[in-house]
């Protein structure tokens, strides 16, 4: 079943008057790998968070398969969020818990609350979580505390957690900003592989233009909350990025080669 | 001499008036409380006599002191634990990042502060009137006090947690209870345990005097001996209490240092 995401005239104004997103509209088709580029403060994170309603649009709405997540509440909202896995710049793992327990968070939406609160996960769900860890190659860390592994490994736990949701969409908010170049490429390759193998629609926020060009299929450019570019990555040149960024490209806009 | 500003002479006058007012205030206080150096001086001999009456301490009553200490510890542990359990829902209600309802948040935050301002001995005195003399009144008094202080301190730690995991849990489709258990509890559990031990330490100290208002423990024994003018016994209780409190303090400090 094809899943379509639609942003319909989404605007976000934060308390204090900052307008993070201005009348943003876009349609994302099933299985696409979209890289969202823009300077920090351009509205990339806001746009991504509108998709799972962590940020509620001031006006407009976001539709997932025709269902408005913007207007969903309580149970209906949690059901929709289950379909959308998220990966964060700072990993957002619970440091004092084991890797496995962090990944099991992805199963919470599927289980009755009495089971999740008591930690009595069915064998099947534990298997799913372990499988996800295996897919990102860190199965051996399952019973290690989350703060005892490296940054790159922590981000892969973040990916495994999102995978454990068996989502239709994965959102990655600057997933490599806290990582070194080789690890960044590893994480990007993981995301592409999962997108292709599982046909999970993927949106990745990046500010590194070389990564965007290398891994993106489609590129959406944001500047000051407005859509300024939307097209295939193959047609993007340095000039396009200069237009999106509104300035000349600098060395720190590049992540650098792998290895 | 150079005047710094046109107000400086005015300020000087105000300062003088202020100092005088303060002096008069202290004099009034001293008068009303019957503070007198003469009485202090005249009281010296009877104080020395009291010290004399207290020595030598009567070590033969140690076997009666021991059960009283056991009761003191029991009061403190039961009171602190009961208070900590009562504190759990209050921690959630008085943490701004968990309880999003501004009205009830402010209500519980203020309530915790109010409950905390009243000293434990006052609770004990009132509760003795309610449930009768004895250690149970002490347990209840300590529970009320522990509840408020643990809830206040822990809720402040809850408000200072890293919001990242909470956001990740919400993104997974977790409900509020799951979010608390998975993202909040692991982050604050060590401080909660540390506050528990800290309050237990305070409570052991407090429960040594709870007996003065009839709420059980070693204080009750002390009060009995003082009322009966058994000063040698009383001094034994005081010395034993001192040793006991120092030991507990040391133990608790070491335990908490290991925890964090």
Image (cartoon, helix red, strand yellow):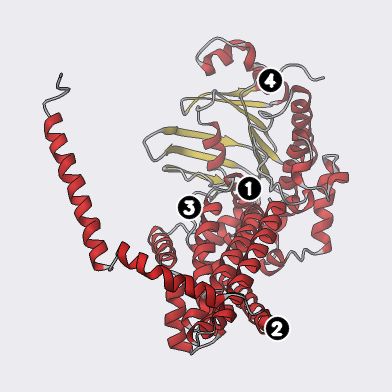
Disc 4/disc 3 C-alpha distance (Å): 35 Å
Q: Which residue is mark 1?
A: B165
The local crowd at label 3, few if under 14, some if 14 to 19, many if 20 or more residues have their Cα within 10 Å, is some
Q: Is residue A1 above or below residue B196?
A: above
Q: Earlier in the sequence, mark 1 or mark 2?
A: 2
Residue B189: image location, x then y, percent: 65, 57
Q: Is residue A163 above or below residue A111?
A: above
Disc 4/disc 2 C-alpha distance (Å): 83 Å
Circles 2 and 3: CB distance less than 8 Å?
Answer: no
Circles 1 and 4: CB distance less than 8 Å?
Answer: no
| Of A166 and B51, the residue lying toward us | B51
| Of B111 and A101, the residue lying toward us | B111
Which residue sits furthest right?
A140
Q: Is residue B181 above or below residue B223?
A: above
Q: Which residue is mark 4?
A: A213
Q: Which residue is mark 2?
A: B63
Residue A71 disc label: 3
Q: Is residue A178 above or below residue B30?
A: above
The local crowd at label 1, few if under 14, some if 14 to 19, many if 20 or more residues have their Cα within 10 Å, is many
- Mark 4 or 2: the one toward you: 2
Which residue sits furthest bottom?
B132
| Of B227 and A129, the residue lying toward us | B227
- Mark 2 or 3: the one toward you: 2
Instruction: Tell me which chain the residue with mark 3 is part of.
Output: A
The local crowd at label 2, few if under 14, some if 14 to 19, many if 20 or more residues have their Cα within 10 Å, is few
């Amino acid at each position: 079943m094809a899943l379509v995401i639609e942003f319909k005239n989404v605007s976000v104004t934060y308390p204090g008057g900052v307008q993070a997103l201005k009348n943003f509209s876009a349609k994302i088709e099933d299985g696409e790998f979209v890289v969202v580029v823009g300077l920090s403060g351009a509205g990339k994170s806001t746009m991504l968070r509108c998709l799972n309603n962590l940020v509620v649009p001031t006006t407009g709405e976001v539709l997932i398969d025709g269902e408005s997540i913007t207007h969903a509440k309580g149970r209906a909202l949690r059901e929709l969020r289950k379909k959308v896995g998220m990966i964060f710049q700072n990993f957002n793992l619970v440091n004092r818990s084991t890797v496995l327990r962090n990944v099991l968070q992805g199963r919470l939406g599927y289980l009755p609350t009495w089971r999740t609160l008591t930690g009595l996960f069915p064998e099947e769900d534990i298997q799913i979580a372990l499988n996800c860890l295996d897919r990102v190659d860190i199965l051996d860390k399952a019973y290690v505390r989350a703060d005892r592994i490296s940054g790159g490994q922590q981000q892969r736990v973040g990916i495994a957690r999102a995978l454990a949701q068996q989502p239709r969409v994965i959102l990655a908010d600057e997933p490599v900003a806290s990582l070194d170049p080789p690890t960044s490429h590893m994480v990007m390759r993981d995301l592409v592989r999962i997108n292709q193998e599982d046909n999970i629609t993927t949106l990745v926020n990046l500010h590194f233009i070389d990564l965007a060009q290398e891994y993106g299929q489609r590129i959406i450019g944001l500047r000051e909350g407005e859509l300024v570019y939307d097209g295939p990555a193959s047609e993007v040149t340095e000039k396009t990025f200069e237009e999106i960024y509104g300035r000349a490209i600098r060395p720190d806009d590049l992540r650098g080669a792998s290895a | 001499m150079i005047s710094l500003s046109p107000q400086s002479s005015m300020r000087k006058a105000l300062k003088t008036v202020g100092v005088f007012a303060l002096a008069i205030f202290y004099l009034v206080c001293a008068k009303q409380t019957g503070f007198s150096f003469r009485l202090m001086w005249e009281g010296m001999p009877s104080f020395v006599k009291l010290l004399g009456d207290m020595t030598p301490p009567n070590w033969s009553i140690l076997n009666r002191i021991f059960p009283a200490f056991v009761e003191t510890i029991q009061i403190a542990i039961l009171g602190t634990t009961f208070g900590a359990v009562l504190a759990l829902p209050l921690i959630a209600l008085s943490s701004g990042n968990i309880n999003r309802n501004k009205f009830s948040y402010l209500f519980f935050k203020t309530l915790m502060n109010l409950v905390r301002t009243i000293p434990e001995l006052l609770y004990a005195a009132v509760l003795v009137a309610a449930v009768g003399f004895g250690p149970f009144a002490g347990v209840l008094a300590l529970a009320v006090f522990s509840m408020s202080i643990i809830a206040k301190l822990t809720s402040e730690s809850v408000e200072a947690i890293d919001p990242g995991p909470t956001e990740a849990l919400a993104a997974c489709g977790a409900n509020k209870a799951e979010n608390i258990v998975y993202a909040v509890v692991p982050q604050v559990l060590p401080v909660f345990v540390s506050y528990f031990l800290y309050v237990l330490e305070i409570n052991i100290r407090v429960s040594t005097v709870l007996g003065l208002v009839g709420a059980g423990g070693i204080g009750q024994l002390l009060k009995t001996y003082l009322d009966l003018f058994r000063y040698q016994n009383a001094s034994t209780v005081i010395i034993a209490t001192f040793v006991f409190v120092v030991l507990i303090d040391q133990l608790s400090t070491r335990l908490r240092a290991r925890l964090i």
